[in-house]
Each structure stands twice: as C-alpha cells, then as structure tokens.
Amino acid sequence: MARVVVLGIGNVLNSDDGLGPFVARTLQAGWDLDGDAEVLDAGTPGMDIISLLHGADAAIFVDAVRDQGGPGDVKRYDRAEIVKGGTKTSMSPHEPGLREALLAMEFRGSGPSEVILWGAIPESLELGTVLTATMRRSVPAILEGVLEDLRRLGIGSRRLDTPRDADIWWERQAP
C-alpha cells in the first residue's frame, strides 16, 4: 500500500490563505484514515516541503490558489500543472516553494510519484485569522475531492460520528 501525505499549506494570519491548515485540521478531526496516510498542517514550509515528503509515494496539497475564476472556486491540479507553473495558472503564494521542491526531488530521482494540489481562489488575503464565508463554503468540496483521491490511492476513510477537536486555534484569537 502506498504512503500518502496530505499537507495543508498556508499562512493562517492572512485570512483565506489559511485554507490549507483549516482543511488539514478539519480532516484530522473528522475522519479516521486507513493505511499509511498522514495529514499535516504544514504552515508555510517553503523548501522544507522536501523533508515532509520523504518516503511518500503520493502527496496531496491543499492551499489557496490564484487562477481564472471567482472567489471560492475549487481547483485541482496534478503534478505536471504544478511543475509547469506560471504559464496558464499561478498557483498559491507558496507555489514557488512547492514547484522548486518538486523539481529538486525530481532531479535527485526521489519524491512522490503522484502529486495533487487542491485549492480554492481566495476572496481576501488581508491580515486576519478567519476564513471568509466564501472560502469556508469551498471546504466541503475540497474535503470530498481529497477523500476521493485518497480512496483512489488505496486509502480508505471513515467519517467519525463525533468529530475530535479540530483545534483551529488561530480563529479563537480573532476579535
């Protein structure tokens, strides 16, 4: 069975850029995953992504993305689209770190064979610790997409009857 890593990326101090950590913690709190799967709130790792992907056969990233469409529109990208970068789409503010890390790993002949990025177009990246209502409405579709990709990769999931505390600590800090 494949080792799969799900990484929520984003800066929780910039409103909708906190999408990745929010989704990662929501997934950790609401589902048990079978097999060799790990879900991480990775924050803003930059090139440290390489160490987080060590030994992974597949990686699923979640982040706010810049692309054609309106705020809250959900997008899915595969490895080729991420590595291609800035031509048709400009991914997240962290994409240069993700793209560079994937290229560095590819050059060394390592890294996950499958890479997916799930995201949504932000409404606001202003200073703030709460997702906008628009971005929050995209969370169920992103979770559904991530869970479907996990199933396709051989990782089953079971939704918990009583979710654990997601510990979205940054929203508790909001005035």
Image (cartoon, grey):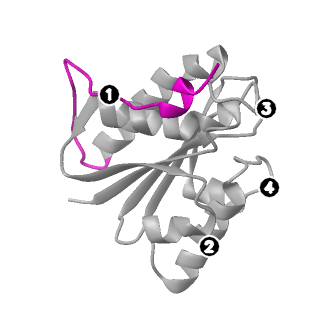
The C terminus, quarter of image: top right
- Location of mark 4 (residue): 86
Q: CA distance from mark 2 to mark 3?
A: 30 Å
Q: Which residues are magenta?
A: 153-175
Vertical placement of 162 versus 151: above or below? above
- Location of mark 2 (residue): 103
Say which element carries label 2. Answer: helix
**In the rendering, at what x and y percent does residue 140 appear?**
46, 21
**In the rendering, at what x and y percent does residue 97 appear?**
66, 63
Say which element carries label 3. Answer: loop
Say which element carries label 1. Answer: loop
Q: Residues within 10 Å of mark 1 (few under 14, many from 20)?
A: few
Q: CA distance from mark 1 to mark 3?
A: 27 Å
Task: Identify which residue, 61 or 44, lies in the foreground.
Answer: 44
Tell me which amino acid carries mark 4: Gly
Q: CA distance from mark 1 to mark 4?
A: 37 Å
- Which numbered marker is on residue 74? none
